[in-house]
Image (tube, grey):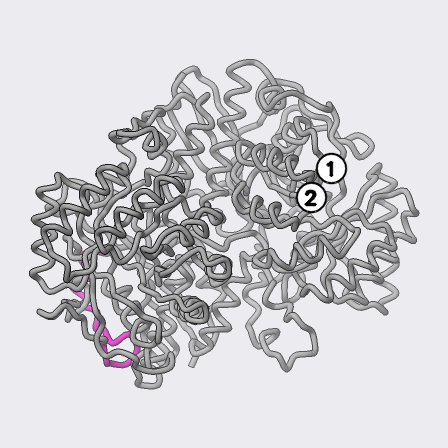
């Protein structure tokens, strides 16, 4: 079997909801729905703006008004198609071009079952040029997922079996997520947060992640309100998106522990390995980080005892091939895996479910609760979420029956 | 003064008299479309994994330039290192970086760098295409800043430690050893202060090539070996010992860039300086290596490692660790060359300037292309900004997307 075509599609899908993406509600600058990076520096780039340290604008990500992603289709001379996805929340055209200009020539003509060999060759293309994260790794992820889907389809088995077997047929997921309170004294916002949290529990979720990073007081109030609303049995998780320094993250972490929070994700900026190590030692609460690509970056944290939970993203960190290696590496250090998803199409959800099913050290998988225009809408048979558990699709490959026309409708 | 327009452009030139991109023959993938890549001349067991480090090379000479125009009509030029697939960095600048900087004050170079970096920071984009695209924009901002105040960039960056820079020649591909010796003799006669030998094709070959070239050029000139990150620690130590015997100045990229621990051990084991940096981008990456003494000479690429803003910080961190800096240039346009020259002029720990003399139309897009003097120096430009004047006709001939 030979690969005969590799196509990448940049998708820009209008947001079907009136609500902007939860991450942009929490961590973008400017008004909700406004392209955050268009906000001029004058609105948040000056020390004179306030007493906040570290300055939050240094962690303000660019968000798009549309839901963007890149879909990769790999086809073979046996008539099979594998679907992959590369994370591309902004500038998906760039990721598409990485696949088209750089990776497709490596993969074309190869046997799609040589997945690991092809991964090394794709990574090798730019290894000596510093490309150890970012657009290249996201693009490799897209091609790698398509190869795994193809491998499963050609052998007639689900991908989780190829990954070593299913530890579980249903994967525990957490609801992702609820934007936290920005001011400790906002009563209306507090009761909206509590209502949303209760609604998620009512819908069957047993774990909820809160977007924090708005100061120790506001964050404490967020967790207090959520805990009050959902009671002691729901797992509450927190993501600070790198907004703190070590001292304030430590102070916050000790408070979160009292509310039984399950982990503190990205407490400090991702470049600060020593800060993660210090927090992991100082706190009982598990420390997690969703910002790392490749086994090498993860290793640098693990050898320093800087992480309790790793959060690789199959569409960003190097695909299933690399995420599997990351999981095994983490296991050797006694760390768990909570696969990162944030927002993605049904392909990412299914690929992540297969990954999660095959992990001995799974903690819980992320599940985006927004209205997903590329979720079941692009499948002929829906993915099933049942009482906070995602059912691993059972067919060959990722087990999806993809409506390709619907999936690619918003290709630009 | 406000930024009015940010225009990326893709430049693409034919390879000319070369039949392959200069590094492709020995550092490149040979078997396009074949899954199992043959090992390149495995002479020892240690050479069996060399194929893992074979890079993709272009069939052209190419790069991405950035032109930024202000509302009062000033124009600044920058370059994003893009030896292959420059459409990718073009797209990042056009789609992501450009829109977020329109309307900003171009003199706010540091703040604008932070703003660009923040846009993808929590998505882990600290390296690669993002960093290269940012470098292109950043260099153009410095060019603008210099033009706005009528000063050369190095004076804005703290002063002129050097008005000309000592150069070494890096165009010595892996060929038949007699050919390599002839090229080395030629470079030596041209007045260069150093010659970098391409390696990483097997320990025995690398050692023999260095020995033969040292014999041919005599003891006066500095020699370096670039192993393109392919060896493991014991092999690198064995090669390093041979380099010490041949008075080699530095051993570049001896190990895969991810092997941080190996680099620290190698630095302790060897007397010859261990150099690396073209695989690294931010001050965070460099500071981690410097803190554990995993590098003796840093070689950041100004059009990859975040531009002048970030490279100046990297130079400062290196200096704190008593480490010298030589910017990686390789095959690049005159815009990148100029930016590198200004950085070298403005830092106290500059060591040597890389000059690559192979066929390179990108170096000729200015009215006065950079050249070395008979005694092996390049003069630092003194005009405002980067101090270069774009030759519009020469540029026009190479632009394939704008």
Between residues A254 and B375, which one lies in front from this camera angle?
B375
Tell me the element at label 2: strand
Q: Is residue A369 magenta?
A: no
* Apparent side of residue B146 relative to residue B361 in the rendered image (left or right): right
* Apparent side of residue B15 relative to residue A203 in the rendered image (left or right): left
Which residue appears at 58% of the width and 50% of the height? A66
Tell me the element at label 1: loop
Could you tell me if the residues under marks 2 and 1 are in contact, i.e. CB atoms within 8 Å? yes
Q: Where's residue B262, x and y in %? A: 45, 46
Residue under numbered circle 1:
A363
Q: N-terminal of the two: label 2 or label 1?
A: 2
Which residue appears at 88% of the width and 40% of the height? A202
Q: Which chain is home to disc 1?
A: A
* Apparent side of residue B180 relative to residue A65 in the rendered image (left or right): left
Q: Which chain is home to disc 2?
A: A
Provide the residue span drawn in magenta: B381-398
Mark 2 burial class by Cα count in 10 Å: few <14, some 14-19, many 20+ = many
For the N terminus of chain A, the image quarter is top left
Mark 1 burial class by Cα count in 10 Å: few <14, some 14-19, many 20+ = some
């Amino acid at each position: 079997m030979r690969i005969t075509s590799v196509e990448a599609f940049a998708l820009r899908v209008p947001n079907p909801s009136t609500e902007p993406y939860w991450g942009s509600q929490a961590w973008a600058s400017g008004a909700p729905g406004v392209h955050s990076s268009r906000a001029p520096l004058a609105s948040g780039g000056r020390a004179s703006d306030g007493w906040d340290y570290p300055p939050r604008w240094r962690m303000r990500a660019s968000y798009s008004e549309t839901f963007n992603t890149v879909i990769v289709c790999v086809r073979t001379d046996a008539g099979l198609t594998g679907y992959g996805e590369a994370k591309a929340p902004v500038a998906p055209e760039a990721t598409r071009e990485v696949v088209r200009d750089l990776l497709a020539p490596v993969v074309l003509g190869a046997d799609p079952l040589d997945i690991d060999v092809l991964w090394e060759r794709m990574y090798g293309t730019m290894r000596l040029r510093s490309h150890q994260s970012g657009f290249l790794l996201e693009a490799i992820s897209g091609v790698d997922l398509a190869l795994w889907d193809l491998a499963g389809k050609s052998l007639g088995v689900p991908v989780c079996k190829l990954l070593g077997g299913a530890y579980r047929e249903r994967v525990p997921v957490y609801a992702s997520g609820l934007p936290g309170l920005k001011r400790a004294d906002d009563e209306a916002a507090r009761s909206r947060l509590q209502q949303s949290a209760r609604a998620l529990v009512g819908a069957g979720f047993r774990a909820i992640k809160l977007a924090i990073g708005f100061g120790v007081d506001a964050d404490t109030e967020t967790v207090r309100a959520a805990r009050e609303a959902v009671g002691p049995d729901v797992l509450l998780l927190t993501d600070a998106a790198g907004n703190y320094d070590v001292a304030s993250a430590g102070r916050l972490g000790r408070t979160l522990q009292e509310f039984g929070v399950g982990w503190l994700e990205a407490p400090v900026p991702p470049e600060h390995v020593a800060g993660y190590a210090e927090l992991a030692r100082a706190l009982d609460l598990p420390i997690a980080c969703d910002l790392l690509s490749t086994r090498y970056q993860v290793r640098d944290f693990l050898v320093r005892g800087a992480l309790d939970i790793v959060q690789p993203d199959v569409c960003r960190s190097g695909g299933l091939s690399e995420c599997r290696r990351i999981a095994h590496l983490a296991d050797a250090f006694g760390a768990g895996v909570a696969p990162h998803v944030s927002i993605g199409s049904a392909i990412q959800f299914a690929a992540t479910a297969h990954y999660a099913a095959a992990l001995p050290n799974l903690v819980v998988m992320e599940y985006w609760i927004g209205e997903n225009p590329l979720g079941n809408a692009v499948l002929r048979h829906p993915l099933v979420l049942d009482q906070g558990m995602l059912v691993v699709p059972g067919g060959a490959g990722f087990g999806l029956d993809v409506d390709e026309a619907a999936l690619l409708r918003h290709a630009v | 003064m406000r930024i009015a327009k940010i225009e990326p452009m893709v430049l693409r030139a034919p390879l000319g008299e070369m039949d392959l991109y200069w590094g492709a023959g020995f550092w490149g993938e040979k078997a396009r479309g074949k899954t199992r890549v043959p090992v390149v001349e495995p002479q020892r067991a240690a050479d069996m994994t060399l194929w893992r480090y074979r890079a993709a090379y272009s069939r052209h000479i190419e790069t991405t330039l950035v032109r930024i125009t202000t509302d009062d009509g000033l124009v600044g030029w920058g370059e994003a290192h893009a030896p292959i697939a420059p459409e990718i960095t073009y797209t990042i600048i056009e789609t992501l970086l450009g829109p977020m900087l329109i309307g900003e004050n171009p003199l706010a170079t540091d703040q604008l760098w932070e703003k660009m970096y923040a846009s993808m920071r929590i998505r882990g984009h600290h390296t690669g295409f993002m960093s290269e695209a940012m470098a292109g924009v950043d260099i153009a901002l410095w060019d603008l800043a210099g033009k706005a105040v009528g000063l050369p960039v190095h004076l804005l960056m703290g002063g002129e430690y050097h008005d000309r820079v000592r150069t070494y020649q890096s165009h010595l591909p892996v060929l038949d050893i007699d050919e390599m010796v002839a090229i080395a003799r030629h470079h030596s006669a041209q007045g260069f202060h150093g010659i970098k030998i391409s390696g990483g094709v097997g320990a025995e070959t690398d050692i023999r090539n260095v020995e033969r070239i040292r014999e041919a050029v005599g003891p006066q000139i500095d020699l370096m070996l670039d192993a393109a990150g392919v060896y493991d620690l014991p092999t690198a130590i064995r090669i390093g010992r041979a380099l010490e015997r041949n008075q080699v100045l530095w051993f570049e990229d001896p190990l895969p860039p991810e092997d941080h621990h190996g680099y620290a051990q190698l630095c302790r084991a060897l007397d010859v300086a261990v150099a690396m940096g073209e695989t690294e981008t931010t001050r965070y990456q460099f500071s981690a290596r410097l803190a554990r003494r995993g590098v003796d000479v840093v070689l950041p690429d100004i059009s990859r490692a975040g531009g002048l803003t970030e490279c100046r910080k990297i130079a400062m961190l290196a200096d704190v660790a008593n480490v010298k800096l030589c910017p990686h240039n390789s095959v690049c346009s005159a815009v990148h060359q100029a930016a590198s020259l200004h950085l070298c002029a403005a830092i106290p720990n500059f060591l040597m300037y890389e000059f690559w003399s192979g066929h390179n139309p990108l170096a000729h897009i200015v009215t006065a292309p950079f050249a070395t003097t008979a005694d092996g120096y390049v003069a630092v430009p003194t005009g405002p900004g980067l101090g270069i004047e774009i030759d519009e006709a020469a540029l026009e001939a190479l632009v394939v997307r704008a």
